[in-house]
Amino acid sequence: MSVNKEATQSRWLVIITALFALLTGLYLLIGGIWLVAIGGSWYYPIAGIVMLLTAALVWRGKRSALVLYGAFLLCTMIWSVWEVGFDFWALTPRCDILVFFGIWLILPFIWRRLATPSSLAVPTLGVSLVVSGIILGWAIFNDPQEINGTLSNDTTSATQQTSTVADGDWPAYGRTQEGQRYSPLKQINDTNVNQLKEAWRFRTGDLKTASDPVEITDEVTPIKIRDTLYLCTPHQRLFALDAATGKEKWSFDPQLKTDPSFQHVTCRGVSYHEATPENAPADVVADCPHRILLPVNDGRLFALNADTGKLCETFANKGVLNLQTNMPVTTPGMYEPTSPPVVTDKVIVIAGAVTDNFSTREPSGVIRGFDVNTGKLVWAFDPGAKDPNAIPADEHHFTLNSPNSWAPASYDAKLDLVYLPMGVTTPDIWGGNRTPEQERYASSIVALNASTGKLAWSYQTVHHDLWDMDMPAQPTLADIKDKNGNTIPAIYAPAKTGNIFVLDRRTGKPIVPAPEKPVPQGAAKGDHVSPTQPFSDLTFRPAKKLTGADMWGATMYDQLVCRVMFHRLRYDGIFTPPSEQGTLVFPGNLGMFEWGGISIDPQRQVAIANPMALPFVSRLVPRGPGNPMEPPKDAKGSGTESGIQPQYGVPYGVTLNAFLSPFGLPCKQPAWGYISALDLKTNQVVWKKRIGTVRDSSPVPLPFRMGMPMLGAPISTAGNVLFIGATADNYLRAYNMSNGKKLWEARLPAGGQATPMTYEVNGKQYVLIAAGGHGSFGTKLGDYIIAWALPDQK
């Protein structure tokens, strides 16, 4: 009886093994033939045939199946290394299933049930498995994507830096209005940062509600003046906290009424201004000597007394400025100031986001300067108007769909120039009907005289932008020395394309060359494509076009699907025009750089950057049933920048999505995000490391360091430490600035898609980040503000 039972079990093990090989073989053969037919790799149909032969041999009980499979596994490893090199995460989907199946075959209770003997069976498969293990073992410790250099500590070439900001303060979004995100503090340094302990945490109580859109985000970088922190929440509630303890001093709620159609509910920060007898009337000084300026997503700007939280009665309409005045469309949520304004001694310079891809009748992206004391309109710069500086009379309006500037701006007080990163005229993904005025400043850096609004210069980074490759981040200002030792006031402007444009901020002339190069042609019907685009020599953009070899998956099964998907899309490299076929957009619409920007240490003349690499797919949808040219009467925004976008008023709607496999994983192989350092004296990348794990993204919380997408920026310090949250896992991390070695990390209770900051109070340095998550990024939502410091010395 037991003999029969054992025989039955043996037969079932053989059947299961053969069935697995059969199904895998059929899948690879059928999918592989499809892939070859559209121009892809021949590996998959060949692999399918081998797996079918293996299944047949196993079914017939022949141990020669192990010989065949061992040779196949060895050839697969050779082919994999030929395709992608010794990159562990690129090799994994090519061989994970195959290695596991090989281990299964070599187990004694499997191969002994294959009756027909073969002396080469076990040794052949064993050698193949050992070789596979050696290759994967080598790859896991030798990442070809990483650069392992060391920054110089030499500061002899540093330019003279003068600042009116106290070392321990962080009074503006980028610490200074130059946007450097650099602190001269060094109590926390590369030798003791691993001793950081949580000092305090504060909960704002501001969480997602039923009336909010998908795109609710906590992107705030608090500011710190003297002993107080000021920060805003996603619903623009304003808090003043004791910087040493995190205790609330006061709060203010602007009573924002959201709607699911809002494209954003976010606040990246607030601005600060001091009114003194030298720069303000007596009644303003008496009313609000210290004021916080709070932008609100429904188109209002509040001025509040920084000491009490009371509205500044002498500003605008009792402390409230209506930014919807003279707007051609005033629907709440269509125009949203999401970034803190620039504040000079004379004016408040403010711009705002305009809903992407909704229609050709949307608010203006006008940039305005308001009197810093009274809130009176001083000047306007409407990028889509024939005369950008014209101020409309009461019965007229600013121009529909002018290019907007939604990211934070920067300011040079000596030159009195404000530098604005510009977006593109919406709708973004088809531009056949754009006017020359709408094209003129789109996707540019625009330098305006802060006191008058007059144009000083502009530099366009994408011509006739059809990819939403706008300027997404605050430019960073830094004085650098050229080869002859001359000091040049520079502006560093990171772009979604991965280019960092380096310009003389007096003139807009490139310091680092950015030659025009030919780009793919063939626009959708009724549109056109610029024949060339500028490509900066300082860049993180991909060195080569994506190929089928760059496609990825958790297994060979979904990797094959991604390869098929890739070859079915239109893709001719960067700037491939949008199409009805579907276009692979890489760098993707999210961009290699986003609103966080970069950090520059002006003493060492180095920059810290965190570029991403995540492709998107755009597909133009011609007008027809269910896709009308004009919006229905009750049409509203989608509440997100991805998915179906109507683009009413132009011949196409569009779908925009990340390029993902059926399992929801990126189809491009990792890494998807890096932390990196640049030597600004040589404009070379000195080190580059993957950053972030899949712990909070995968079904199983595994801490695999694959390099994750990010939203937020790094900061750098004189202590040779950089801090960054941003990644799609919930951590704040510290790295050695010189070599990129990770020194410390702290687990966050929610997503840290914000830029951290650091400050000093009562002789102690703190590091702080907002951990509130990001709705469309998919991280855990929360309402936390958390600070860390070194333990007190006993």
Image (tube, grey):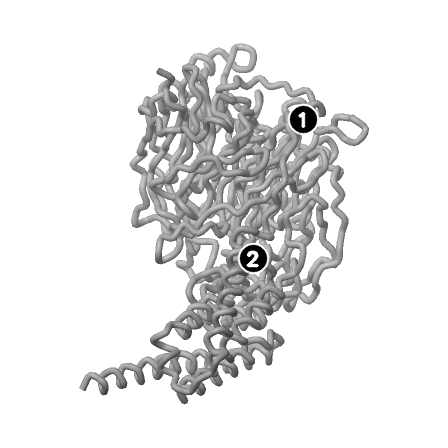
**Residue, x 55% and y 15% (percent of image)?**
279
Q: Quadrant of the N terminus?
A: bottom left
- As drawn, 165 above or below 341: above
**Residue, x 54% and y 34% (percent of image)?**
736
- Residue situated furthest right in the rendering: 484
Name which residue type carries label 2: Asp
> Is residue 580 in sight in this rendering?
no
Relative to the observer, which residue lies in front, 665 or 648?
665
- As drawn, 180 above or below 15: above
Binning the other alpha carbons within 10 Å of mark 1 as few (below 14), some (14 to 19) or many (20 upward) gives few
**Residue, x 61% and y 60% (percent of image)?**
85
Name which residue type carries label 1: Asp
**Residue, x 57% and y 46% (percent of image)?**
611
- Residue situated furthest front in the rendering: 119
Q: Which mark is residue 154?
A: 1
Relative to the observer, which residue lies in front, 331 or 541?
541
Question: SS of the residue at dot 2?
Answer: loop
Q: Residue 87 carries which label?
A: 2
Residue 109 image point, x, y percent: 34, 75
The numbered mark, 2 or 1, whose residue comes first in the sequence reads 2
- As drawn, 218 above or below 668: above
Q: Residue 268 carries which label?
A: none
> Is residue 735 in sight in this rendering?
yes
Residue 733 image point, x, y percent: 45, 38
